[in-house]
Amino acid sequence: MSMNTPAGKECPHYYEDFNRGRTIQECRLAQANPDSMRWRPKDCERCAVPEIVQANASPHMKLTLTIRPALLGFVRQKRVEAWCIRHDVPIENPYVGCPLDAEENPALKLFRDALDE
């Protein structure tokens, strides 16, 4: 289930609950990474995770978000890394996905064969 982030993007890793006096807002992707700084709602503004999930919804892709200070601590840098859990390899371009998954996909194989003809 995806929720809209404070930046207005739909993200499956964002969670909020303001029901009955609660004030919970969290990025579960950043929260799961012990090397990341504490998440703030403003971090959603320039986060690439919603676009990556929209471009590639592979069930075999695991994302890691790391928030680090940059520019003398005035700027917060967000780095997203992707990993294919099926083939246990890093994914260079998470928008495209794992190249090994693409090779094994029968629908894409049919498409490549049609292009070769």
Image (cartoon, rainbow, N blue to C red):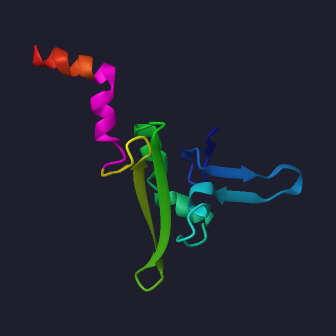
Is 95 on the left-hand or right-hand side of 12? left
Identify the residue at the far left of this view. 117
| 52 is within the stretch colored magenta | no
* Residue 14 location (% of width, % of height): 62, 51
Query: Image point 49% across, 47% down: which residue?
Result: 50
Say which quadrant the C terminus sits in: top left
Image vertical order of residue 72 relative to residue 55, above or below: below
| 96 is within the stretch colored magenta | yes
Is 19 on the left-hand or right-hand side of 97? right
Residue 56 image-quadrant placement: top left
Say which quadrant the N terminus sits in: top right
Image vertical order of residue 72 relative to residue 76, above or below: below
Image vertical order of residue 28 relative to residue 42, above or below: above
Query: Image point 54% across, 63% down: which residue?
Result: 43
Q: Nearer the viewer, residue 91 or 38?
A: 91
Q: How many marks?
A: 0
Residue 28 image-quadrant placement: bottom right
* Residue 51 location (% of width, % of height): 44, 45
Q: Nearer the viewer, residue 8 or 11?
A: 11
Query: Image point 89% across, 51% down: which residue?
Result: 20
* Residue 30 location (% of width, % of height): 57, 61
Magenta segment boundaries in residue numbering:
93-108
* Residue 70 location (% of width, % of height): 42, 78
Identify the residue at the far bottom of this view. 72
Q: Nearer the viewer, residue 77 or 7?
A: 77
Is 95 on the left-hand or right-hand side of 6? left
Query: Image point 46% across, 59% down: which residue?
Result: 46
